[in-house]
Amino acid sequence: MANADMNRLMDHARIRLPGALDSAIQMELFSVMNEFFQTSNIWYEDIQFPVAVTNDSYLDNPDAYTYYVIPSQGTITRLAGVVNSQGFPQKAYMPIIGQVILGYSPNEADTYTARMMLTVSDPVTRDGYPEFPEWIMQKYGNDILDGVLARMMSQIAKPYSSPQMAQYHGRMFKQAVSQSKVEASHQNVYRGQNWRFPQTFASRRFVKF
Amino acid sequence: MALDTVQDYVDRVRVLLLDQIEPYRYPTEDLVEALNMGILEARRIRPDLLKSFFRSSLPDFSTSAMNLVVPIDPMYRVAFVYYICGQAQLRDDENNQDSRSAAFLNKFVAQMTNIMS
């Protein structure tokens, strides 16, 4: 069952898009959410994974440096950073989605935490809606609606086709995505800085979450 | 009339065609076949209407199962009535005028693609 915010978005879309089918709106909603998350990075998950010491080099034994992470919801788009159990950043890469490769072997067995940016994925709910945290719809519902309207109105030969309005709503959506990206980088702190403690000295690299 | 089943469509079409008394001028088989053709047309001009059939064959109705539900969104069911009427009146028949057939078929397309129709 869709929540109140999702129902509100659908009602707005139905009213503004005469003749549009719910299934078509839901299909575009999935694309809009995917673009929204891929661009803004506002949805992430910290995923812990155990690491083990190895004396092999990466070229000799790549598997010893490779770890696989799976988010509880959605699908991974990019890796924001990896920290050890003390919170110190660790060099890591993700050439293939979900496959974390450490730059260096850990000094001891530990549990690392990878911050993964996420986006929507199949399967959708039984009602056909993509799944993502509810607060995002509460905060960005009108902006998401702009994205849906832009994509729907840009379709050709439909009762709701409108290239001009598609451009307008598309512009509004792009602005909202940019705004949400900044807010996410500030962790939703008004005029906030994007780094976090501990940062013991200025030259230390820090993870820019 | 809810226009749910094949029979609903045929009944409604017969009203517009003034063909409600047996023996019918337009055989039921022809009207059902026109409905099938309407679905083919809809797949072309409004593929979203038949999204659930993208990976399967389109529904194909016959007079042996008149109670089958026609899987068309309620917003567009009336358009199919007009299409069936238009197809029926395309026949070379002394009761028909080409302009009436064209009007029905154009109305179908207009309702599918425009707000005002």
Image (cartoon, rainbow, N blue to C red):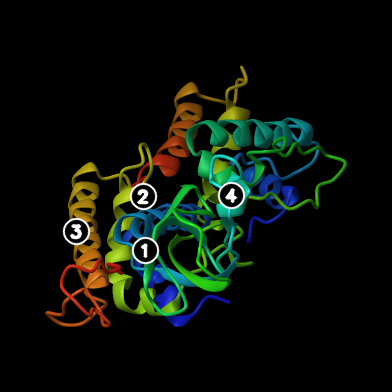
Is A181 located above or below residue B110 in the figure?
below
Marks 2 and 3 on same chain: yes
Instruction: Describe the element under mark 3 as helix, strand or loop.
Output: helix
The image quadrant where one finds the N terminus of chain A is: bottom right
Mark 3 sits on what residue?
A172
Which subunit holds the residue at mark 4? A
Residue occupying the far right of the picture:
B64
Quadrant in which residue B25 is drawn: top right
**Residue A55 percent coordinates (x, y):** 58, 54
List the residue tagged with mark 4: A56
> Looking at the picture, does residue B110 appear above or below residue A147?
above
Picture mark count:
4
What residue is shown at x 55% (from left), y 53% (from top)? A65
Q: Disc 1 marks which amino acid? A: Ala
Q: Nearer the viewer, mark 2 or mark 3?
A: 3
Same chain? Circles 4 and 1: yes
Q: Is residue B20 left or right of residue A134?
A: right
In 3D space, how far apart are the residues under numbered discs 4 and 1 (Cα atoms)?
A: 57 Å
Chain containing mark 1: A
Q: Amino acid at mark 3?
A: Met
Instruction: Indicate left or right for A209 with B77 as reference.
Output: left
Mark 4 or mark 3, earlier in chain: 4
Q: Which of the chains bears the disc numbered 3? A: A
Name the amino acid type tagged 2: Met
Marks 2 and 3 close (CB-CB < 8 Å): no
Residue A152: image tag? 2
Marks 2/3: CA–CA distance = 14 Å
**What chain does mark 2 sit on?**
A
Q: Nearer the viewer, mark 4 or mark 3?
A: 4
Where does label 1 land, which residue? A13
Q: Considering the numbered disc 2 on the image, is that residue within a helix, a strand or a loop?
A: helix
The amino acid at mark 4 is Asp
